[in-house]
Image (cartoon, rainbow, N blue to C red):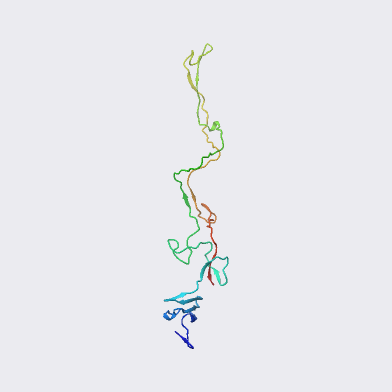
Amino acid sequence: MKKNYGLDMQGPFRIERVAALPVWDADDLGREVYLTTNNKKYRGNNSVWAEVDVDKIWTSQDAAPTGWSIMAGTTDALLATKGGATYTTGDAQAGTWTQPTHTHTGGAHTHTGPAHTHTGGSHALSIAEMPAHNHRVTRIFLESGIHAFHSGVGTTPQPVNTEMTGGGGSHDHGATSSAGTGATGSANPTTGSNGTPNTYRPTANVGILIERT
């Protein structure tokens, strides 16, 4: 405690510029000092010197006000609270917008929806597209100019095969599709190689992180 012309100068009335914080004692309760090494003000609370002014804040503005500047390295990032396995350190940036390359594998499932019809392009098979095959016919002999069918006079019918035809070639019915799995995600956030570029951003109220200058 100091006396100055009979006035008690302890507590909040005693403000001075210092190059280092004094060793705290009970008389410093409520006292304020301005630390010249970092241009911050401190107040003595019940046990220590506590910083009075916050020097880093988020604000819903487009540009930093006078006396402040946008913190470097904080652009295009969300705000998060410290904790867990990813955000382990405060006053730092962690996490990534990069989508990892990954694979979607579909399992057995059923789609239930309204009755509908799939209409595709029509196609008539050519001879070359038909499977190889022949046609069997029955040969019947004639006697004395009379047609001797199986129910009439004649010899026993003899089956005979025609020549082979058809080529078993491939064909399509217009639009087709194939099943399988595929890799998605982006190994390159700029070009989108191996998947989709990292263009997704959630709807946000955009502001700036600023610090005193």
| Residue in view at x 51 percent, y 68 percent | 57
Query: In the picture provided, is 48 more to the left or to the right than 171?
Result: left
Please provide percent x and percent y for residue 49.
45, 76
Residue 99 or 77: which is nearer the viewer? 77
Q: Quadrant of residue 62?
A: bottom right
Residue 65 or 143: which is nearer the viewer? 65
| Residue in view at x 55 percent, y 69 percent | 69
Query: In the picture provided, is 106 more to the left or to the right than 191?
Result: left
| Residue in view at x 49 percent, y 50 percent | 183
Please provide percent x and percent y for residue 34.
50, 78
Residue 2 or 147: which is nearer the viewer? 2
**Camera sees residue 25:** no
Q: Quadrant of the C terminus?
A: bottom right
Query: In the picture provided, is 108 more to the left or to the right than 190?
Result: left
Please provide percent x and percent y for residue 140.
50, 17
Q: Is residue 190 above or below residue 162?
A: below
Q: Quadrant of the N terminus?
A: bottom left
| Residue in view at x 49 percent, y 21 percent | 160
Please provide percent x and percent y for residue 167.
52, 32
Query: In the picture provided, is 169 more to the left or to the right than 108?
Result: right
